[in-house]
Image: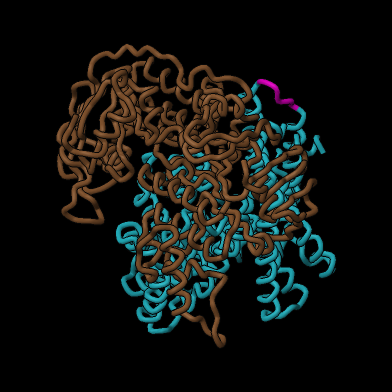
Chain colours: A cyan, B brown
Amino acid sequence: MIYIKKIFGDKLQDYTMVLALVALAIIFNIISGGKMITSSNFQNLISGNAYVMVLAIGMMMVIVIGQIDLSVGSVAGFSGMVMAIAVRDLGLTWWVGVLLSLAVGATIGAWQGFWLAKLGIPGFITTLGGMMIFRGGVIWISRSISVPAPRELKIFGAGHLPEWGPAFTGMNNSTLLLGIIAITAFAFTQLRKHNRSKKTKELWPVLVRIALVSVVIGYLTWIFGTGRPGTSFPVPGLILVVLVLIYHTITTRTTFGRHIYAVGGNKSAAALSGVNVQKTYFLTMLNMSFLAALAGIMFVGRSNAAGPSDGIGWELDAIASVFIGGAAVSGGVGTIIATMVGGLVMTVLNSGLMLMGVGADRTQVIKGLVLLAAVGIDVFNKKEGRQSIIGRLFPAKSK
Amino acid sequence: MEHPIILQMQGITKIFPGVRALDDVTLEVHRGTILSICGENGAGKSTLMKVLSGVYPHGTYEGKIIYMGEEVTFKDIKESEHAGIAIIHQELAMVPELSVTENIFLGNEIIKRGLIDWDAQRVHTVEVLKKVGLTVDPDTLIKHLGVGQQQLVEIAKALSKNVKLLILDEPTSALNEADSANLLELMRGLKDLDITCIMISHKLNEIAAISDAVTVIRDGRTVETYAVEAGQVDEDRIIRAMVGRSIENRFPVHVSKPGEVIFEVTDWRVEDPNNPGRLVCKNSNFNVRAGEIVGFAGLMGAGRTELMRSIFGHNYGIYLGGSIKIKGKEIHVNSVASAIRQGIAYVPEDRKNLGLNLLNSIRITTVSANLKGILRGGLLDLDKEYEVAEEYRRSLRVKTQSVDRGVATLSGGNQQKVVLGKWMFTGPDVLILDEPTRGIDVGAKYEIYRLIHELADHGKAVIIVSSELPELIGITDRIYTIFEGEITGMIDSKEAQQENLMKMMTSNSGS
C-alpha cells in the first residue's frame, strides 16, 4: 500500500473515477464481444463527443465560481448557425466565418457576464434567459431550416491526421508521433519536478510512474493508430487535448485560475484578499460562451450543416461531466483533468450501452443513475475523510 | 452550599477513533446556581455537553449521568430536552425569515384541530419574552433583531419548554458589552426561577462576575472544581489550571521604539451603504508611527470595523472624502488590490467567513493575497509557493504536519498565524488587525501578541481593533476611542484604564 501511495500520491480516492472508467470500458468490451475497445469505436467516441468535453472545460470553471451556465447549448447552436449563414449568404471565407462565430460567442459571454457581475443576477437566471433567447435566435435566423456548412470545417469536426512516412510502423505515423510526444513530455515534466525537489523524494516511484503512463499512452496510440487506413487520432480530439493543456495550466498555474477557486470557495475572503470578484465572474462567463461557440463550430463541421436544434441538451451533459468529475455544487472545488475523466465516463457509458443495443430511453435512465451514484460516492468519501473534525477538536493529541 | 445537587456526571469517558476526548470527567451542579466550565479550545468542554444532552447517545460513552436524583440514559436531544435540559449553541440556530413566535415554537407548535393555534402561541411568546426582559413584537422577523436580542429569543425558546438546566456555549462571544452585561444579568435572574445554568466561556471577567462554581477541564480531564463567590474569582488560578502552567503575564513585555509617523488618515468620511445620509465615519483623523502599535476601542457598532474596511480600499460603505498618507506620500486606494499594492494589510475579525477560504491548504492560503510574489514568467511557481509557505510556517511556529494540510484542520490560533503570514507576505507598511485574538485560547493568544510585537519591531505600523479592553491596554502604545463613528479621544496606553476608556467610548464629549 505504501508503495502504491508513493507512486500515485496520497490521495488514492482521486483515482476512483479513473478506475471506474477503465472498468466500464473492459466490462462493455466483454459484454459486447470485443466491440468496445477497437480502433474505430475509440476514434468515433472521441470525435463524436469532443464538443461536449470542450463545453465541460468551461462549465467546470463556471461551477467552480459557484455558478451554472444553462445557455451553452443554445449559444453553441446560435454561434454555429451565425457562421453557416454568414458564409452562405455573405460569401465570407470559411475561416472568417469561424472568427465571426467565436466573436459572437465571446460577445454573448460578455452580455451574460455583465448581468451576473455588474447587476448581480444569479448565473442560473441569467443563463436560463440566455438559453431561451439564443434558442429562439437560432430558429429565428435560420427560419427553422438547416444551413449547409463550409466543407473545410469537416476536418475540425471529424477529421483525421495525415498519413506520411514509412509503412513499417504498421500504424498512422501522425498518431505515433503524438504518442511519442506525449510520453516524452510526461517523462520530462516528471523528471524535472523530481530534480527540483532534490531532498527526501526517491527516484524509483517517478520511474515507475513514467513507465506506467508510457504503457497506457503507448497502448492508446496503438489503438488509435491502427484503424482503417486514412484514420488516426481524430482532429477534434487533438483540439480537445490542446484545450485541456491550456486550461489545465490556466486553472492551476495562473493568477486568474487561483482567483476562480478563491471566489468560489469564499467570495468575501477573496474580495478582502484583493481579488476582483466581478471581473472573475465576468471573465469566466465570457470564456464559457467562447468555448460554447467553439463547440458549436466543431459540431457543425462534424454534421456538415448547422441545424436549428443543434445544442439542445448539451448543457446537461456538460454539467453532468463536471459533477461526475467531483466538482462541488457549492463551488470552489473541481479540476479540468477530473472533469475530462467524468466526461469520458459518460461517453463510454453512451457508447457501451449503444453497442449492447440498449435503447435511448434506458440509456438516459442509466446515465441519470450513474450521475447520482458518482456524486453520492463522492459525498460519502468526503464524509469518511471527515475524521478531521476530531482532528480539529484535538489537534495536539491526534498524532 | 445548601442547594441540592441537580446533576452529577461521574467518570465520563468518551473515545473517538484514536483519541480519548474525555477521560474520567466528573462534574457536579447544584440546583439554582451557575457553573462555569473553562478550558482551552479542544479541552473537551463541548464534547462533555454533547454527552450530557444526548448528541452522543447513551452507550457511546462510559460513566454515569445522574440528573434530578436518577440515572438518565438519553438516546437523543429530544429526550434530554424532554427532561428539561437545553443547550444554546455558540452559533444561534434560528430561521431569520420567520417571526419570533414561529421560531420559539418551531418543532413544538401548539396544535388545535390539526392547525397551528396562533393566538395561544402569541400569548405564550409574550409571556416568555417578558421573562427574558425582551420587549419586541412577537411577529417581528428574527432577521430584524440584533444578535443580543436573538440570543434572548433563543433563551426564551428554552424557557418555553420548561427548561430546568440551561447550557450556554460561549453565550457572549458574538455580543457587545451592553448586550453581554444584559445577558449575564438575565442569567443571575434565572436563578430565582429555579433554573440552573452551565456556562462555557473563555471570558474570565464574565466567569468571575456570575459563577457560583468553576470547573476547569484540560486535555479531556477535570483539573479542578471549586465553589466561588461571585465577583471574587481568582482569574490567574483559572488560567493556571487551563493551560497547565502559570502564565506570569497575560501579555508579553515589550518596549516599542516608535519612529516617524508613516500612516496618516485625514478627515475620513464614509456613508452607510444601507442607510443613505447616515455617516459611519465622521471626519476621522488619526496617525500611526513606524514600529508603533495603536489600538482602537469602541463598542460594537461604533464604526471601528467600518472605518478600517473603508480605509482598506473602500471595501465597506460609500467613500465621501478624506485622504491617506503613507510615509508622507498621499495615496489613493479605490480597490482592495490597490490598497494591498500600496502597503496596507487588513486582517478581518471574522476569520472563518472573511479571512480564510476553508477549502484551501495552508500553502495556497499563505500566498493568496500576493500571487504576484510567486509569479515566474507569467505562471505561478509552485516550488516558490511551497518555500514561502514553509518559511512562514517555521517563523510563525504554525503547528501542523505539512503546509499541504487544509487550513480547516488547524486550531483557531494556528489559523490566525496562517492569516498573519498571508498578510506579512504582501510586505505591508501598515497592518490593521481586527479582533486578532477572537476565539483563540489563552496560550495561543500570548503567541499572537508576541507576533504582533515582532511586527512592530520590524518597523511596521500596527493598528489593532479589539473589544477586549485589557488586551488593548496590554499590548498597544496608544489607544483611540470611537463612539458613533467619531473618534472621541486618544490616550497613552500607560494611562489607560478600563474605566476611563469606557467613558471615552460611550460619549462624544471627548477626553
Image quarter for residue B332?
top left
In the rendered view, tell whether residue B288 sits above or below residue A148: above
Q: Does residue B436 appear left or right of residue B46 in this picture? A: left
Q: Position of residue A181 (x, y in %)?
A: 63, 40
Magenta stretch, main secondary structure class:
loop
In the rendered view, tell whether residue B358 sits above or below residue A330: above
User: Which residue is depicted at the point 40% across and 35% down?
Assistant: B435
Question: Which residue ends up furthest to the bottom in the rendered image?
Answer: B113
User: Which residue is depicted at the point 49% across and 35% down?
Assistant: B208
Q: Position of residue B154 (x, y in %)?
A: 49, 59
Front residue of A142 and A31: A31
Front residue of A97 and A267: A267
Q: From which residue to which does the magenta span run?
A: A199-203
Q: Residue A251 magenta-drawn?
A: no
Q: Is residue B79 visible?
A: yes
- Which part of the image, by quadrant, shows the N terminus of chain B? top right
Image quarter for residue B505?
top left
Q: Is residue B19 visible?
A: no
Q: Position of residue A300 (x, y in %)?
A: 49, 69
Q: Position of residue B471 (x, y in %)?
A: 40, 28
